[in-house]
Amino acid sequence: QNIPATLVEGDGIGPEITASVVELLDVLGAPFAWDRQSGGLEAVEKYGAPLPQQTLDSIRKTGLALKGPLTTPVGAGFRSVNVTLRQEFGLYANLRPTKTVVSGQHFDHIDLVVVRENIEGLYAAKEYYLPDGDDPQGLAFGGGFNSRRECARIVRFAFEYALANGRKKVTLVHKANILKLFSGIFLEEGRRVAKEYEGRVAVEERIVDACAMQLVTDPWQYDVIVTTNLFGDILSDLTAGLVGGLGMAPGANIGTDVAIFEAVHGSAPDIAGKGVANPLALLMAASLMLAHVGRFDLRKRLDDAIEKVVHQDGVRTRDLGGTAGTKELTEALAAALR
Ligand code: NAI
Ligand code: MG
């Protein structure tokens, strides 16, 4: 147990799914030494903030975190915890692999990855409403920026990911036909970076709306998709839908010094405490975390166990049309790992 990592259970179903994942990583013999820290509503009660200083300090120190879903308290004075984490640690890349585990749904054999720029674009914007108040002539103004440096960095991340993971093609997704500067800069930098990988990884370009259409008519043509913040946010939820929804969608937020792994879904308050939550999205995030620290051997064993139990043996939670509870699924996975 030699790699320190921060663990934040999170809200709602967070404690149930993190308990499941930590148990399975234990059985697997994963090398993480957990530093448990609080976040979300529990932290608001204890420390008056959803992301207390101790938690941030721990993540800065370990550079590695597995985190359950955090509820952003509604009300004045609280920024989105997820946006805060991305900005605080410069987590510029959001990696969302999408792979079919359970066949026989609308789509089969899906295996693609969305790489989303995570700190610029429209989400870096301040919004304004002019004039103040509810004047019928009022207008809302939003903006944002994309920098050359960041566009090049995210595209390079996508190509490096492709090389390291045996992927053949990277698609640059943009809207440079309309947003000639704002999206054009991404396309320009993307083309420039792509040249460095000529002969090793193929490149193609798509306009984002056409890409969305093709993702539901012929998703198999895609391999690695790289795009700016807002487009990536939307497309990666779409791709999660191709493989059974949010319960099957892991995500990684990666910066130069810190990487945070999580499920794409939220705290699911409607099913919290009922023992029916699907732990697979967080478990697959842990699998990405194993790859991140170079333990491809353990990652493969974990992925194989998921494939066997969920796909072949059909042990599934309700969101996947099954009847298993979190515990049952966890026990079946633990047995497969042993
Ligand atoms: P949600 O993802 O929590 O739930 C949407 C639907 O999916 C619900 O019906 C839920 O039961 C189901 N679902 C989600 N995860 C599931 C799982 N593992 N197994 C089975 N079913 C699952 O989205 P919602 O309701 O919009 O957000 C709830 C809270 O989560 C909000 O406070 C929001 O701020 C927070 N949130 C946090 C995120 C994070 O920390 N990364 C991401 C998204 C939302
Ligand atoms: Mg989103």
Image (cartoon, rainbow, N blue to C red):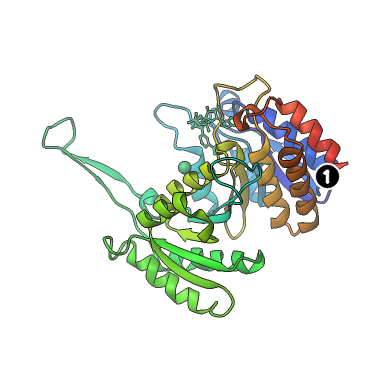
Compared to residue 92, the image places residue 265 above or below, namely above
Identity of the residue drawn at 32% across and 64% down: 176
Q: Quadrant of residue 139?
A: top left
Identity of the residue drawn at 28% across and 65% down: 180
Report the residue marked by disc 1.
28
Q: Position of residue 217 (x, y in %)?
A: 45, 51
Quadrant occupied by the C terminus: top right
Q: Nearer the viewer, residue 291 or 304?
A: 304
Tally of marks: 1
Q: Position of residue 117 (x, y in %)?
A: 47, 56
Residue 265 visible in this rendered orientation of the protein: yes
Q: Is residue 238 left or right of residue 257?
A: left
Q: Position of residue 232 (x, y in %)?
A: 45, 52
Identity of the residue drawn at 69% across and 56% down: 292
Identity of the residue drawn at 61% across and 22% down: 272
Q: Is residue 180 left or right of residue 222?
A: left
At label 1, the amino acid type is Leu
Q: Position of residue 273 (x, y in %)?
A: 65, 20
